[in-house]
Image (tube, coloured by chain):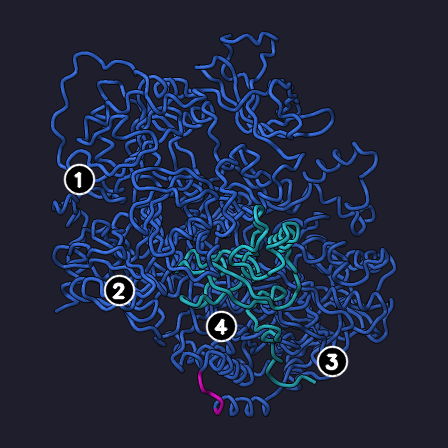
Chain colours: A blue, B cyan
Amino acid sequence: MSRLPPSSTERIDRSRPLGFRWCGRALEGFEGDTVASALWGAGVRTFGRSFEYHRPRGLHDLEGEGSSQLVSIDGVPNQSAGTTPLREGMDVGAQNVRGDPRFDVFGLLDRLDRFMPAGFYYRLFHRPAWAARFFQERMRGLAGLGVLRPDVPDRGERAERYLNADVAVVGGGPAGMSAALEAGRLGLRVCLFERRPWLGGHLDWRVRDSRPLAGEVSALADELERMESMRVFRHAPVTGIWGENLLTGFQYRGAGGPTDGWTGSGTAEAFDETHWECRARAVVVATGSIERPLVFEHNDRPGVMQVDTAIRLARTYGVRPGTAAAFSVGDDLGLEAAVDLASLGVDVRMVADARHEGHDEALVAALVEAGIDFRPGWAATRVRGRSRVRRVELADRTTTGAGSGATVGSAGGGAGDSLRVACDLLVASAGRQPDIGVLSCAGARFRHGQRTRTFELERLPPDVFAAGGVLRLTDVEALTTSGRTAGLEAAAACGADVAEALARERARLADLPGPARGSSIVRGPVAGRRLAPGRKAFLDFDEDGTWKNAAQSAAYAFDVPELAKRFGNFGLGPGQYRVPGQNLAMAMAEIAGRPIGSFAATTVRPPVIPPSLATLAGPNHDIHKRTPLHDDQASRGAVFRRAGPWLRARYFSADRQCLEEIRNVRENVGLLDSSPLGKFRIWGPDALRALQRVYISDMTRARPGRCTYSAMCNDTGNIIDDGVVVRTGEDEFYFTTSSNRAGTTVEWLRFHTRYDGWDYNLVNLTDALASINVAGPNARRVLEKITDAELSDEAFPYLGCREIEVGDGVAARCLRLGFVGELSYELHLRASHARYVWDLLWEAGAEYGIRPFGLEAQNCLRAEKGHVIIGTESEQRVTLLDIGMGWLWDREDTASGKVGAAALRYCEGQSGRLKLVGLRVDDPAGDAGAGTARDPTHRPEDGALVVDGDRIAGFVCTTRHSETLGWQYGLALVEDRLAERGRSLDLYESLGRRTVRWTATVVPPHFHDPKGQRLRIAPEGRPRRPGKAPSPPAPAAHRRSPVRFDAAPARTERRAGWNVVLDYESDRAPADVMRRASLVDLSHRARWDVQNRDIGTLRPFGLDVPGTPGKVAVRDGLMINRMNGTQASVWHVGPGAAPAMPDGPHYTDTTDSHCWLALLGDSVPEVLESVTGLDLFDPARARPFLTQGPVLHVPCQIVTWRGDAVLLAFSRGYGQTFVEALLESGRHAGLRPAGERVFTDWSHALKS
Amino acid sequence: MTFRLTCPVCGKRDVYEFTYGGPERGPRPAEADPASGSQAAGGSDPAAGSDPAAAAEAHFRWAQFRMNRPEPQEEWWHHGAGCGVWFSTWRDPATNREAPPGGAEAGGHEASGRDSS
């Protein structure tokens, strides 16, 4: 172990050794070490092999800036050794090596560099053509660093959090802390992000005149910790700034990581990471500076390291960076480090400074006093030694070229203009460059500065401010003052009145030392004749980009940095242009013989610091809608598939042809859950005009008690939706849409009437109403058993619509439709009642052998009937006329401005359009005789192409086998000239590399019951099974919540049909409830929608509607939320029974539309922060207030009642999956389900 | 790329909450009446109603043409994940920031700090 004696600055705990493995060897480090410092401290010099030449690489930086220090940890590749805290038992492995990193088999590639010039992979290996594939496979095998092992499962817990701040500060050094404090003192909400696990920036390890500088800013850190409005995130790198000050980043939460700002238990996983996003009104960037590598021959050898790396190894981790050292630096911090390392007992033999003048005299004096050979104007030229530094050559920059040279054993003088120094550590740096990564992402612009010799900030984007080292300030007082200035500027951008203080700080800053002088050196003096200049002098360590490669790029005319970086792969690795970007710009200028600074630094792109892909992927909740009948269908063997936001039952058996399900509907009776069907209520004086606008038919024909079928088109005449409309009142209608249009129908109507100022109201009832389809010849017999309503063909004909009661007085709207081509009743009823009625139908149908059927069976049934599904039998080229539904179009009506009518008129009679035709797939054996039993699976796939001669002339929409017909039928869209009956079509489908040809004959697209007789007068179905007892009277109706917690109820109460859980077994003691977070399901409580153009004049339930949207009023157990200009919602928050809904068209009972949850407890803000970016706790807003926006990507209405109480409501279908995701995301904050009593207790306490 | 829009009801929100309704282009042109050739109600262009070809052309331009200029334009947006309101706003598609009609967008500012020369 090469550890130094303990020092006051170190961050390791020497009393807690940690054992770990490196390439199979057992090593030891200390608590507080990173993997890199532990390895170096244990004497490991080669960490891995480089990307292209497989050169040995050691520890160059501790910031995770380069690929050299990437290792695999516990089988997970590409982990940054420099930033990952060491953990007991870690298994660390080298990357890009075969065998031991010290003796890598591919190390010989290093000698083949002349065959791998810049961009060789773009230019070679293309001819002959077969060679490209051969070399691609070979080179892919060689390229890359880490190995992704499929046998290693994904590790760690990934979380998300979304922050809202007035001011976000990037960087927790002296400038960043000062800026944060200044803004925080004004009461602004401040978030500070520091990439290291502690605050203080580079002062944390710097020691000047035996005095640790950390003490100068420790007071700042203490004040930050205490400040109320301040949130400090340590070990939380910023990956980028996006439009309008959206900061993204991540935070390590693993072992040894910080737990601040995160009350969850710090688990033992090394891979726990949080992805965070912070929306800020103003940003202060105080990212400080990073080092610009010095370029010279073999500048990548293990033992060559940055100034900060050497000094941090010694000062932060107590690791001896080397025994004998040479320095080749470019600024005063380098000199300071040399003095400090010498004082720690490292034998510093020589310090070369690329600058000829401008040194800090005190430091020079200290060097001389320590007896160190100090050489201004000198720099390193090359390193000798393979897997570690053995000797360093240095030369005078002014007298470039090969000198005779003298060898220096220990620190001692040498004659001439070059020297060799024997050492095992070369601390090399061209100087410091501002860390422009984050600023560059934000869109800041830079120019080269003459004094600092770096790229300086020229222009900042709006509401972004910079402070500290990023401005190249180094004086501690100047750093804090510039921080305060930026903090005040940010506060001013948030509207604070700080002009006076700002002027004062600016004046103070003007009197303090300005930016430090730097050196424009990129490359050390060229010396030696054996090596072509720059051949092993690396500009970019990640991709092995050498000086020579840069010169080659320039020779190929990729002679500006932005081109060279792409051609020569400079900065495409983890360094992300931050590290090599400025060097490359300066190198390209030097190669072109132009003044340094004539090229701008290349743009840094996010992620500035790469997070793992798993962190970006996040917790990946599968949030979808479920129907109220989901659980029962699942228990009956349903196979579910996603359809838009919904999970729907597609099959009920292993038979993907669904023959039994189809036969049952044709001959008997089946049940289909069609709840995702879009369902809407529209009313108001202009409701009819709005329907006339969007529906293509004459909607004045819509009558009470009758379904009017129609379709919607878009402005190009494409059919986009179909459904039925029922008139339910003087100015009131009920209409349905296809499932996938349900979410956009309200938007569509409002959009197409946006100029008209019409007075109509619209409520989406899709989630509020379940839809159960009873279909088949026996449907009536089954339905009769659960309702007293008259169902005969005379009383309730085809296309009728009746309000009926089923079972124990449950209201249902019954529509007699025939999508599947059989007698069928569609029951639209409250979602909470759906399961009750569904169970009744099962019981009633048992004697007939009722069965469920899924979407696939429905698809076959409707296709047999020739009914289209929009999107399957239509696409964006297809109009209403093309699919043969022109009869729907009310062509006389030009006054309504029907959407799509103009386009239909225009393309009516056009030739060359696609037409919908029926197909009869020919038997490949040539036996096309009817009734031939054929393999039902033997048919072209949906989407097979129709080919006419040598061109594509359409496609197959759907083909299925029909048991009824005995042959394969289908629907296809083909060019009109092919659409004549009896025409033979060629169909092709590609199965992998194989193309299969089919032939089919055009037939009319109505295969089953073309006249529709079965719909009007149903044929006799299968007889009932004998011996069944008559059904007992209907049980009492019950209602169900969309949510079921995974907890055992302890106390329940029956309330208006609902089974309300008052307590769960797992509920906390009353005293504990508010300390963490509880989730209460309030879906059983009543909610109403109130809509009216003059909503202010209505007094629903005797309450005043709040005047402006977002306002909330609570009175008499009711909470009324103003949603927008015309709409409010009323929630029954209790206590007591819910009042009856007032009469009048303005009210809609939306109890069943939503899942309603209450979140209670002190950690509620933390729970919500991990699921939504909405600013729900804005201190500037008077509570309670309403926010409408996405939580877990689900649109929600959220009432922020207090800091520890939030109510939220969202579409009912999302209920179960939303709650599961919420509980998972909130687990770290102690979120648990709770019974209703927690809510009632809380609201009682509120009153008293 | 991410930007924000100011909803008249909910205030500034992420663009992901909205759906785009295209640039402002005025109400739908009147449809030509094929039977009478007379002007239909609601039209703004008296010539359009009388001539079916002109009406078709007007409708075609209205429905299909977009100018796509990199300058502030008035656009329709729907706050679908929020209050459900359609509104129009001025935005510069070149910068993705809301911008006044014809005006310059809010620019950046000079870096503050010590003069480095």
Report the magenta residues as a range.
A496-500
- What SS does tag 3 mark? loop
Instruction: Classify 10 Å Cα crowding around label 1: few (below 14), some (14-19), many (20 and above).
Output: some
Quarter of the figure with residue A373:
bottom right
Q: Depth-wise, is mark 4 or mark 3 nearer the camera?
A: 4
> Which residue is found at the position 26% from the left and 66% from the top?
A1201
Q: CA distance from mark 3 to mark 2?
A: 56 Å
Chain identifier of the residue bearing label 2 in the image? A
Question: Which circle's residue, 1 or 2, is located before the other in the chain?
Answer: 1
**Amino acid residing under circle 4:** Val
Question: Which circle's residue, 1 or 3, is located before the other in the chain?
Answer: 3
Q: Please tell me which residue lies in front, A740 or A347.
A: A740
Position of the N terminus of chain B by quadrant: bottom right
**Amino acid residing under circle 3:** Gln
Residue A1204: mark in rendering: 2
Chain identifier of the residue bearing label 1 in the image? A
- Is B49 included in the stretch rendered in magenta? no
Rendered location of residue A53, percent (x, y)? 73, 48
Labels 1 and 3 touching (C-beta < 8 A): no
Quickly name the residue at label 4.
A169
> Which residue is found at the position 54% from the left and 59% from the top?
B27
- What SS does tag 4 mark? strand
> Which residue is found at the position 17% from the left and 62% from the top?
A1117
